[in-house]
Amino acid sequence: MDDDRTHFLVLGGGPAGVAAAIRASTLGARVTVVEKDIIGGAAHLWDCIPSKTMVASAHRRRNMRTAPQLGVPGVARDVDLPALNDRMERISNDISHGEVGMLESLGVERLEGWGKLTGPKSAVASTADGDVRIAFDLAVVSTGSAPRVPDWAQPDGRRVLTTRDAYGLDELPEHVVVVGSGVTGVEFVNIWASLGSKVTLVVSRQQVLPHRDPEVAAVLEEDFLERGVRLLKGARAVGVETTDSGVVVATDDGRRVEGSHVLLAIGSVPLTEGIGLDAAGVETDGGFIPVDQFNRTNVPHIYAAGDVTGQLPLSSVATVQGRKLAHHAMGRPTRPLDYRRVAQAIFTEPEIASVGLDEADAAAEGRRIRSTKVPFASNSRSVIQDATRGFVKLISDPATHEVLGGTIVGYRAADLIGIVALAVQARVHVEDVVDTIMVHPSLSESIAHAAD
């Protein structure tokens, strides 16, 4: 019997694609997902989840090294790398299997293979069993991204690593040279330094996290230096040589850094080549797919979401994009996503999290703001946890008292920022935050104190 339901095609089963597939299916569409690698997304399950699993192990080991300060001597401090690798793989597989089960329970068709548009309403999936031709009514392109590889380096998966090569290594690197001081770079610096590797970070600017608040960068740099991380500032990597014992990284100012491994953490590129965008009439710009506020491309019935759009490259953003575009595509009301109200986090030690307007944004806009900051050193729970490094900073409108943004640097910042994100999203006033009675002792008290 013919199925006359709206056919919704999803190219790419990452966070955006899975969210769109689930929501479109619950809204009555017949959904087909084409994915060549892993349901859940390569960037998500091969980057985000493994890296945060390593962060958890690194954090636990660092706690063990400092445990005597809390009166707990004699705890183990070694790293069982095979056990860590097994745990990373198990967690990623469990998450993927859970999402596959959800899609199957909704009757979503899954095709394992390479998907390619062949026209405005047609596509083909190249699978192990041959080509499957697909006619669709609506589609979303959510094919993700891959690590950027510069022309001066040739990754080999052994000594010269991209971020996708950094998981499952046979042994802990003796000395890692990390090229790139953005989010991914500093997270790996934290991981390897905490696990016991020597680390050198090549910083092309004069601070790590060059697009972040200088106060944030200063706290992180202080922590890195205390742990013996070497910061090579004002140096741009221009070459990598492999030797019998490791690698040599050359910089544009003539310096050379020797190490056992080099990690290239210099961003990502969208995977939009070879998927038939031209055949469907979908326009691109620098490899990215421009979209409107509802994630529509220039072809109204074809949407795009996730890393291919050039918006914030976060799994959380991709998920919301997928859910919202499915609503819009299926004719249901939905609000546009406000990217300025997206909470973000960097999983270093201390953690770094932010949402909404910051001081640099306000200065660029010529906007008057009120900025208040409270150090975690004044928080009872932070003192108890021996985690006093960092601060809470809130940005508010001096005229309306509305909470406009915030930055948290410190223990559990990624969790705490949710309070500020809700305040920003709901346009809460600082007085409402002050009047909210937090648990004592708790880290959240610092948010109320900053509001006060």
Image (cartoon, rainbow, N blue to C red):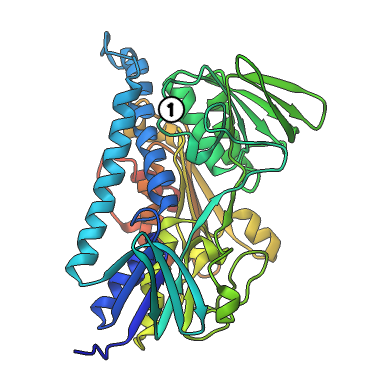
Q: Position of residue 297 (x, y in %)?
A: 54, 79
* Left or right placement of residue 350 versus residue 224 in this view: left
Task: Say which residue appears at 45% left-offset and 76% top-offset.
Answer: 123
- Is residue 319 visible from the viewing direction of this image? no
State how many labels appear: 1
* Left or right placement of residue 252 versus residue 312 in this view: right
Identify which amino acid the numbered label 1 is placed on: Leu
Q: In terms of depth relative to the viewer, which is nearer, 362 or 378?
A: 362
- Is residue 314 visible from the viewing direction of this image? yes
Q: Is residue 419 above or below residue 30?
A: above
Q: In terms of depth relative to the viewer, which is nearer, 247 or 422?
A: 247
Q: Looking at this rendering, what residue extends furthest in the top direction?
A: 74
Pointer 1: residues within 10 angstroms few (<14), some, or many (20+)? Answer: few
Task: Say which residue appears at 48% left-offset and 34% top-offset.
Answer: 166
Q: Is residue 334 above or below residue 268?
A: below
Q: In terms of depth relative to the viewer, which is nearer, 85 or 414?
A: 85
Quarter of the image that includes the N terminus: bottom left
Quarter of the image where one finds residue 28: bottom left
Quarter of the image where one finds residue 210: top right
Task: Say which residue appears at 32% left-offset and 20% top-offset.
Answer: 80
Q: Is residue 240 above or below residue 315?
A: above
Q: Position of residue 386 (x, y in %)?
A: 36, 25
What element does badge 1 sit on? loop
Quarter of the image where one finds residue 445: top left
Q: Position of residue 364 (x, y in %)?
A: 70, 61
Residue behind mark 1:
169
Task: Say which residue appears at 49% left-offset and 36% top-offset.
Answer: 165
Q: Looking at this rendering, what residue extends furthest in the front direction?
A: 130
* Left or right placement of residue 216 versus residue 325 in this view: right
